[in-house]
Amino acid sequence: DTGVSQDPRHKITKRGQNVTFRCDPISEHNRLYWYRQTLGQGPEFLTYFQNEAQLEKSRLLSDRFSAERPKGSFSTLEIQRTEQGDSAMYLCASSSSIPTGELFFGEGSRLTVL
Amino acid sequence: GENVEQHPSTLSVQEGDSAVIKCTYSDSASNYFPWYKQELGKRPQLIIDIRSNVGEKKDQRIAVTLNKTAKHFSLHITETQPEDSAVYFCAALDTGRRALTFGSGTRLQVQP
C-alpha cells in the first residue's frame, strides 16, 4: 500500500499522559497536514508542513501540541498532558507541491482520553 | 481565515432520486473547492473538485457548481444508489493558511 499510513490506529490513555502519533505520507508528496476530527464534524486544520518546514499552525494547536517533520519525510504529532477534550480522530494528509492538489488522507489515529 | 458553512446536516433520499448539498464560504480569494466522501470508519476521499475559473464540472452522476459572486457551491448527485450513503464534506482553500477548511458534513442516506 503506497498511501498515507498512520500509527497507531487507536490509542487509549489516561488524562495527563503524553501520546505521540506518526504519519508516513506518500513518498513524493512534500506537503503534509494534520487535521483533527470529532464525531459529527468536518476535519479541523491543525498544522501544515512543506518539506521539513512547519508553515502554519492553527490556534487550536495549544502549547501542549507539537508536530515535527524531520528530514521532510514522516511526521509526528505529540500531545502532552492529555485532556479529555483531546479525544478525537487525528488525521494526516499529504499532497503534491501544487497548492490545489488533492489531499490524500490516512486512516487516522483515534485517541481516547479517559 | 476561511469559514465554510454546509447544509443540510442530514439528507435522506429514495434510490434513484437526486441529492443536493450546498456550501457557502467567506474568503472571496478562495479558488479551490473540493468535495470529499467519508464512509463509516474510513478516510475522507476526494470525489470531485472545482477551481474558481469554471462554473460547473461533471463526472458521471456527480456534478459541482460554483457561484463566485454569491460565494456558494453545490454538490449534485443524480440517480442515487445505496452505495452513495456516506458523509460528504465540502471544503475551500484558505489562501492565507494554504490549507483546506472543511464544512461540518452532510450525512446522506439513500433508501433502497
Image (cartoon, rainbow, N blue to C red):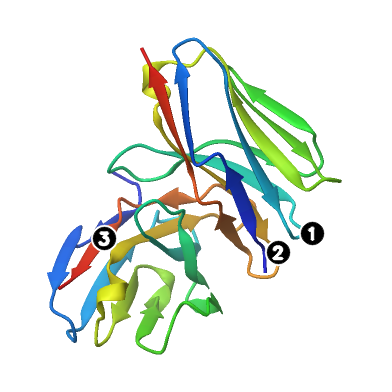
Q: Toward the viewer: B81 or A35?
A: B81
Q: Position of residue A114 (x, y in %)?
A: 15, 73
Give the Cα separation between the discs numbered 1 and 3. 33 Å
Q: Position of residue B107 (x, y in %)?
A: 43, 37
Q: Position of residue B40 (x, y in %)?
A: 30, 39
Q: Toward the viewer: B75 or B110?
A: B110
In the rendered view, does B57 fall on the left or right side of B14? right
Kindly tell me whether residue B55 is visible in this rendering: yes
Q: Position of residue B36 (x, y in %)?
A: 50, 41
Which quarter of the rendered picture does the N terminus of chain B lie within? bottom right
- Same chain check for tags 2 and 3: no
Q: Residue B95's mark?
A: 2
Kindly tell me whether residue A99 is visible in this rendering: no
Please say if B4 is above or below B42: below
Query: Which of the 4 image quadrants contains residue B51?
Result: top right
Q: Residue A34's mark?
A: none
In the rendered view, does B73 fall on the left or right side of B88? right
N-term mark: 2 or 1 = 1
Label 2 Cα neighbours within 10 Å, binned few <14 / some 14-19 / many ≥20: some
Which quarter of the rendered picture does the C terminus of chain B lie within? top left
Query: Which of the 4 image quadrants contains residue B44?
Result: top left
Please say if B73 is above or below A99: above
| Residue at image point 31% right, 74% down | A85
Q: Which residue is mark 1?
A: B29
Q: Residue A109's mark?
A: 3
| Residue at image point 35% right, 45% down | B43
Give the Cα separation between the discs numbered 2 and 3. 27 Å
Tags 2 and 1 in contact by the CB under 8 Å rule? yes
| Residue at image point 57% right, 17% down | B18
Classify mark 2: helix, strand or loop: loop
